[in-house]
């Protein structure tokens, strides 16, 4: 999975909305909802093309199309805003800045333009100009927390530390934003040499569950290490690892080495501003505003190009857009020396698998598993890749190698046993599969997917039907909106000759998963059993529409022609 990289900003719901002109297709200001003025046949066509490209997350095409539309209507603030966001998202900085200048001449409160030009000011070292630009902006929507952060760092860059801290104080008034205040105020005090104040503020950040993020742990841990307080740093690292026991994203030895080499996660005002953009982008990614999130990431990258967690966030946004090759290129740019590089490479392999480059994914995961012979996460991903490729024996072997590295399994390892059980079952090694499912239930007795899989497997074999029914009924209680589990209950009721109950749950399953071939096939069998022959054949025909496995397709065709003999689901 993609890696969680929330800063304390992620506690926001973003129900606040976006400021004027910081827009996406899914969230825009009231003015923008009216759409731009039509600019003639060619211009309006480019606008529609741009909207269509944006919906497909093709921000490259969308940026160019909006730019072409602007040629017909150069003072259209809506087009300027959208084009500026997308140009910046695609890293076309010079063009984004030019559009921002024009947009601000029309709308002095255009949020995206203010952000773009504030970054330009900071890169030039003109923090006074940046602070002045930000001071006039409204504090609503995204601006309600981004502007105070940017203004504070601008003031700090202009050597006005007390004014910088004062700019942050509105964040203290919101319990949701208090960890954000503590983190950035701590950073500013730290850089100003006010170490005791920084320590107190960092502690207030960590007092909130929202404050205990990977980024905060790394920054605050580095602060303690720089002060020579190794015990405090280790306690913080241990606290994070207790909540994230299998993480490969935090390496205390690497953190200590970076401090010994004079490294500091955030050392300048520009990097502090990058941190603000990073956190806001993470929030917007969570809210589904990918285009604006990517714009904020690019702004952060302008200020701090070598920011590994920012690169992970950028790659995650590109993954959400379906741009897997682009995401992998970003991942590949993260140095191997970074603690996050291990997890990033696993993610690269998973993307290769999604791109149907299975052999490359397998080779990378095998290399990773050899690189760190005590870690098991690369082997789990390898098992997943092999299982999806229907190489079930190889998948089971990979999971077994992972289990060997784990040793005696703990509760959280039920999922590996479940995955290996599926691989064994599909490889027709039922005794081993059954043993894994049973052991998974020892570790996690109320796990609905294991209850369902084991119960359904027994039903298919015609054994332990009473126990299977109880297990599947419990799974339905735990996951009442899961169509596959509803199908399992309908199927066991059918096998136990409770046809009324079978119809009820099969129809419920088809409501929840209308395009699953097996569920359609099962519903056809149940309809046939209760005498609804035309409906049965209709369901079997639907089965063939949804690309079933060859065996399912073969039996469905036979049933369409001959119907069923008896109620056991066979021809």
Image (spheres, helix red, strand yellow):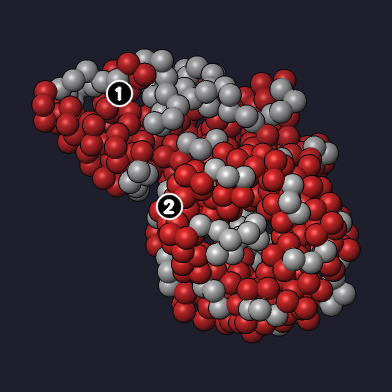
Snapshot quadrant of residue 43: top left
- Label 2 element class: helix
* Residue denoted by label 1: 78
Residue appearing at x 41%, y 15% in the figure: 30
- The location of residue 495, given as percent across then percent down, is 71, 56
Image height check: is 487 above or below 144?
A: below
Circle on res. 237:
none
- The location of residue 268, given as percent across then percent down, is 57, 46
Q: Which residue occupies the foreground of this view, 149 or 44? A: 44
- Label 1 element class: helix
Name the quarter where the N terminus is drawn. Answer: bottom right
Residue appearing at x 62%, y 29% in the figure: 13
Alpha-carbon neighbours of circle 2 within 10 Å: few (<14), some, or many (≥20)? many
Snapshot quadrant of residue 85: top left
- The location of residue 419, given as percent across then percent down, is 69, 68
Single out the mark in the foreground, 1 or 2.
2
Residue appearing at x 78%, y 78% in the figure: 431
Is residue 202 shown to the viewer in this render? no
Is residue 82 shown to the viewer in this render? yes
Q: Going from the N terminus, do you reach mark 1 or mark 2 first?
A: 1
Residue appearing at x 41%, y 31% in the figure: 24
Q: Which residue occupies the foreground of this view, 329 or 480? A: 480
* Residue denoted by label 2: 541
Please give left or right for residue 371 compared with residue 358 in the image.
right
């Amino acid at each position: 999975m993609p890696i969680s990289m929330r800063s304390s900003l992620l506690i926001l719901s973003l129900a606040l909305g976006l400021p004027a002109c910081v827009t996406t297709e899914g969230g825009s200001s009231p003015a923008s909802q009216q759409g731009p003025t039509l600019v003639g046949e060619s211009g309006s066509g480019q606008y529609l093309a741009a909207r269509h490209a944006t919906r497909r997350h093709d921000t490259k095409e969308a940026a160019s199309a909006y730019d072409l539309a602007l040629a017909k209507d150069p003072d259209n603030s809506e087009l300027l805003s959208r084009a500026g966001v997308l140009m910046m998202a695609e890293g076309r900085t010079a063009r984004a800045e030019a559009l921002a200048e024009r947009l601000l001449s029309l709308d002095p409160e255009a949020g995206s333009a203010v952000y773009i030009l504030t970054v330009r000011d900071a890169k030039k070292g003109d923090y006074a100009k940046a602070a002045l630009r930000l001071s006039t902006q409204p504090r609503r929507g995204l601006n309600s927390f981004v502007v105070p952060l940017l203004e504070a760092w601008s003031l700090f860059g202009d050597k006005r530390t007390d004014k910088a801290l004062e700019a942050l104080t509105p964040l203290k008034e919101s319990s949701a934003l208090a960890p954000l205040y503590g983190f950035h105020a701590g950073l500013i005090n730290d850089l100003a040499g006010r170490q005791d104040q920084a320590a107190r503020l960092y502690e207030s950040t960590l007092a909130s569950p929202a404050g205990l993020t990977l980024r905060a742990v790394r920054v605050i841990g580095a602060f303690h290490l720089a002060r020579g307080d190794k015990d405090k740093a280790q306690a913080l690292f241990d606290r994070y690892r207790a909540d994230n026991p299998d993480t490969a994203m935090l390496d205390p030895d690497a953190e200590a080495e970076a401090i010994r080499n004079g490294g500091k996660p955030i050392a300048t005002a520009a990097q502090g501003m990058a941190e603000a953009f990073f956190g806001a982008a993470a929030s917007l990614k969570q809210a589904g505003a990918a285009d604006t999130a990517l714009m904020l990431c690019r702004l952060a990258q302008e200020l701090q190009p070598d920011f590994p967690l920012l690169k992970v966030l950028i790659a995650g946004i590109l993954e959400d857009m379906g741009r897997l090759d682009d995401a992998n290129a970003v991942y590949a740019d993260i140095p191997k020396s970074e603690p996050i590089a291990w997890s990033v490479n696993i993610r690269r392999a998973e993307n290769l698998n999604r791109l149907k480059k299975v052999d490359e994914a397998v080779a990378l995961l095998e290399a990773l598993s050899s690189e760190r012979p005590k870690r098991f996460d690369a082997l789990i991903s390898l098992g997943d890749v092999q299982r999806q490729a229907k190489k079930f024996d190889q998948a089971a072997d990979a999971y077994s190698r992972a289990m060997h590295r784990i040793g005696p399994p703990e509760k959280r390892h039920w999922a590996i046993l479940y995955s290996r059980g599926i691989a064994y079952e599909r490889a027709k090694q039922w005794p081993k599969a059954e043993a894994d499912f049973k052991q998974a239930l020892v570790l996690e007795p109320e796990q609905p997917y294991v209850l369902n899989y084991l119960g359904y497997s027994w039903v298919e074999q015609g054994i332990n039907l009473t126990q299977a029914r109880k297990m599947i009924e419990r799974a339905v209680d735990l996951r009442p909106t899961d169509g596959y589990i509803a199908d399992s209950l309908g199927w066991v009721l059918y096998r136990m000759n409770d046809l009324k109950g079978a119809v009820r749950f099969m129809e419920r399953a088809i409501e929840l998963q209308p395009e699953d071939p097996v569920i359609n096939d099962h519903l056809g069998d149940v309809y046939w059993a209760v005498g609804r022959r035309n409906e049965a054949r209709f369901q079997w025909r639907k089965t063939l529409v949804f690309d079933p496995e060859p065996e399912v397709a073969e039996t469905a065709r036979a049933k369409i022609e001959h119907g069923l003999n008896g109620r056991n689901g066979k021809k």
